[in-house]
Image (spheres, rainbow, N blue to C red):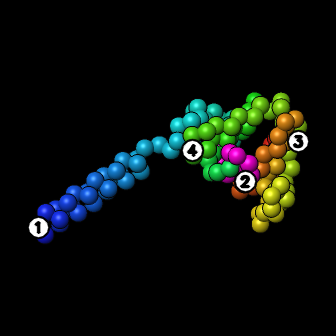
Amino acid sequence: MTRIVLALVVAAIAVYVIMRIAQGQSPSVAKSSLPALDPADIQEAAAIAYGPDRGYGILRLTPSQLVFAANSGRVLTIERLDITGATVTKNLPDRESAQPMLAVSTRDAMYYFSVNDPLAWELRLL
């Protein structure tokens, strides 16, 4: 009886390790949601800090769009022509952030991105 239990535990551990290795080798959902990186594009790991799409992913700036591909697989696309402003702020609608955020406004909404250098992103968007 003890040998059977031990064999089941070893088999379960083996299956778990194999699944973890397979997941580690597969590309992330966020990266697979985006087309190939163009030389003119700027890309950075980022997070949406407020709103229903809140979470981690990749922020990419192309000549025509600002694209956030979330790790969940959702993709938020903002046309550059629709961007009415960009600024750096610590004030989010529901709290004050410890670090500066990139705030991007459109006619319909405001988006808050956590990036390494929000000032550089602001200058790129203006």
Where is residue 107, by image quadrant?
top right
Frontmost of labels 3 and 2 is 2
**Is 65 situated above or below 9?**
above
Q: Name the front one of labels 4 and 3.
A: 4
Find numbered disc 2 in the image and state the secondary structure of the residue it sits on.
loop
The answer to if 95 sits in the magenta stretch is no
Q: Residue at x 20, y 60 (%)?
A: 8
The range drawn in magenta is 43-53
The numbered mark at residue 72 is: 4
Q: Quadrant of residue 80?
A: top right
Q: What's the mark number on residue 1?
A: 1
Q: Residue at x 27, y 60 (%)?
A: 13
Disc 3, SS:
strand
Distance, label 4 to label 1, CA atoms, is: 43 Å
Residue 66: give its label: none
- Looking at the rendered structure, the kind of residue marked 2 is Ala
Pick out the residue farthest to the bottom: 2
Where does label 3 land, which residue?
85
Label 1 crowd bin: few (<14), some (14–19), many (20+), radius 10 Å? few
Residue in the foreground of this view, choosing between 19 and 35: 19
Residue 3 makes an appearance in the image:
yes
